[in-house]
Image (cartoon, rainbow, N blue to C red):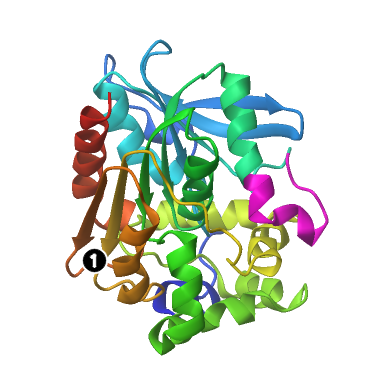
Amino acid sequence: MTPSRRSFIKLTAAAAGLATLGTSAIARASGSPQLRPLRILTPVGTFDAVAAGPRNGRKVLLLHGFPEFGIQWEHQLLALAAAGYRAVAPDQRGYSPGVRPARIEDYQLDHAVTDVRAMADSLGWRRFDLVGHDWGAAVAWIAAAKYSRRVRSLTAVSVPHLGAFAEALRTDPAQQFASEYMDRFRQPTPIPEDIILAGGPPKLTGVPPEKCAEYFRRLSQPGALTAALNWYRANDFTGYTQRVAVPTLFIASTKDPMVAQSGINATRNWVTGPYRLENLVGIGHTIPAEAAETTTALILEHLATCR
């Protein structure tokens, strides 16, 4: 099991009594961008989200990973807003109480990809830029390939194109070793849930303890952690072979304990449009937090080139 995922099991409980991390905790001075709560009504239910920036700004949708929520993107949301973008980061299916189906198969990636289109429709976004980290990157790769007429650009963080990732899982012992933790997460409920909840908040590199505690508080709500783990139970990453034609930035890292370099290097073979790889030296898996300034600068630079 890898360090950041391992910490989710081993740390002692420390969340009791901590205040909820809401918009009041991340408000900025008057005149500066602020994160504001947003509810996105779709045919499958209502997604909770945080948003920043002018409503008439260029649209950016940011998708989180495990064990994070939309507030993972706080730094990037505020910077995008300051640059005039309208940035929205939803809590994905299972993380949003209003979209928490009970069946494992409802967490197959195809459903999360359809959610992207449904949320864009609900927001009235004809075209938008897409950003994703971890599971959010997996969703974003597929959505960018499938909805190329609507997705202006893609920024994927940490996770390679699933064609490259599936091949690495099949052939690369380094990736097989790095992904062993997934088998533990795929055990029947409530085995991994009980272990994780007994361990207390995760310790994620670059993420403030109060935000880790907020992730843990939300995942401790009835059904939430099972839903999040169902993403692992429902998916083996195979079958996603459509190449991406939109301009793509892939932000990876050399010290990611969950992603081997083979999949990172092979991703260029799965993009037919303009492609740029930034492999951050010495950074781990939680790139948006651990290298927040660099991540934000790269996203803004990428968006500026994709008009």
Against 176, residue 202 (above or below) is: above
In percent of the image, x 38 and y 72: which residue is there? 259
Residue 109 shown in magenta: yes
Against 232, residue 38 (above or below) is: above
Q: Is residue 272 left or right of residue 232?
A: left
Q: Which residue is mark 1?
A: 283
Q: Nearer the viewer, residue 161 or 72?
A: 161
Residue 225 in the image: state x and y as whole percent.
67, 60
In percent of the image, x 29 and y 61: which residue is there? 252
Q: Nearer the viewer, residue 270 or 104?
A: 270
Residue 161 in the image: state x and y as whole percent.
43, 59
Q: What range of the chain is rendered magenta?
A: 99-112
In percent of the image, x 35 and y 60: which residue is there? 269
Let me know if residue 7 appears in the view: no
> In terms of secondary structure, where does tag 1 sit?
loop
Give amino acid for label 1: Ile
